Image: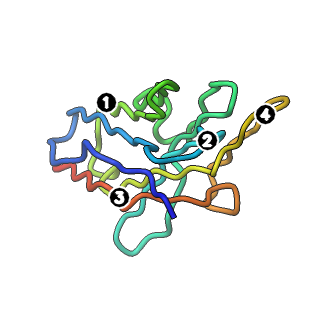
Amino acid sequence: EVQPVESGGGSVQAGGSLKLSCTASGYTYSPYCMAWFRQAPGKEREGVASMHSDGTPYYIDSVTGRFTISKDNANKTLYLEMNSLEPEDTAMYYCATDRGGPGLKGVRLCPLTPGPTYQRWGQGTQVTVSS
């Protein structure tokens, strides 16, 4: 199974910024749904931001105003720009996508729950924020 590939993680101090990238190379079709999830040690995986098929972004409350999700459709690349980082943002960040398809009628909403919408997951990129 083809997987998306994440990059851009690292270690920063609180208040700093990072920009994550996720490339869906090797996919037969462009994904309809692409999203970022994160998982901190001892915690469940949680959705951070997704982009509906019409380009509408969707965020969890704790990152609204600090994180920005964007997508380069031509290159099948999803980004997550993270500003004003907090120690609570420390986690492994995962990119998740569906398999896409040859065409879509209407808008596909992309949830922030790691359920059946997302069939392909990347290996993750670590983000560490120190106080």
Report the amino acid beneath label 3.
Gly
Q: Mark 4 or mark 3, which has the lower sequence index?
A: 4
Instruction: State yes or no: discs 4 and 2 in contact (Cβ < 8 Å).
Output: no
Q: Which mark is residue 124?
A: 3
Closer to the camera in the image, 115 or 119: 119
Of tags 1 and 2, the one toward the viewer is 2
Give the spatial CA distance, label 3 vs label 1: 19 Å
For image coordinates 40% across by 33% down, the residue present is 79
Q: Mark 1 or mark 2, which has the lower sequence index?
A: 2
Report the amino acid beneath label 2.
Tyr
Q: Mark 4 or mark 1, which has the lower sequence index?
A: 1
Q: Which residue is mark 2?
A: 29
Is 108 positioned to the left or the right of 24 in the image?
A: right
Closer to the camera in the image, 26 or 78: 26
Report the amino acid beneath label 4.
Leu
* Rendered location of residue 99, percent (x, y): 63, 51
Dot 1: element: loop
Q: Which mark is residue 104?
A: 4
Dot 4: element: loop
Closer to the camera in the image, 116 or 88: 116
Is 121 positioned to the left or the right of 7 in the image?
A: right
Bin the neighbour count of mark 2 within 10 Å (Cα to Cα): few under 14, some 14-19, many 20 and up: some
Q: Which mark is residue 83?
A: 1
